[in-house]
Image (spheres, rainbow, N blue to C red):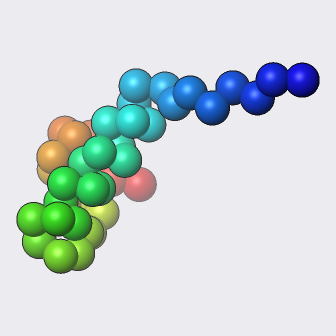
């Protein structure tokens, strides 16, 4: 049985955004993520 380990493009974008913000600021807030991805907060 094979396991599909691929990520959807939106999940990949989300994770990459978190990574980039963390490297730049040292911390990540939900506000930072939603501003960068231009989405509504939860």
Residue that extends furthest to the bottom in the rendered view of this protein? 26
Residue 31 horizontal/vertical position (percent): 22, 62
* Front residue (pair 5, 38): 5
Say if 32 sits above or below 28 in the image: above
Q: Residue at x 18, y 76 (%)?
A: 26
Say if 18 sits above or below 9 in the image: below
Q: Residue at x 69, y 26 (%)?
A: 4
Residue 14 horizontal/vertical position (percent): 35, 43
Say if 15 sits above or below 5 in the image: below
Residue that extends furthest to the front in the rendered view of this protein? 1
Count of numbered labels shown in the rendering: 0
**Image quadrant for the N terminus?**
top right
* Front residue (pair 1, 7): 1
Say if 2 sits above or below 19 in the image: above
User: Which quadrant of the figure has residue 23?
Assistant: bottom left
Residue that extends furthest to the right in the rendered view of this protein? 1
User: Which quadrant of the figure has residue 22?
Assistant: bottom left
**Image quadrant for the C terminus?**
bottom left
Q: Is residue 40 visible?
A: no
Q: Residue at x 40, y 25 (%)?
A: 9
Q: Is residue 28 left or right of residue 4?
A: left
Q: Is residue 11 left or right of residue 3?
A: left
Q: Residue at x 27, y 56 (%)?
A: 19
* Front residue (pair 20, 37): 20
Q: Is residue 38 visible?
A: yes
């Amino acid at each position: 049985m094979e396991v599909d380990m691929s990520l959807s493009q939106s999940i990949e974008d989300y994770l990459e955004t978190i990574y980039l913000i963390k490297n730049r600021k040292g911390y990540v807030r939900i506000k930072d993520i939603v501003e960068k991805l231009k989405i509504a907060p939860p």
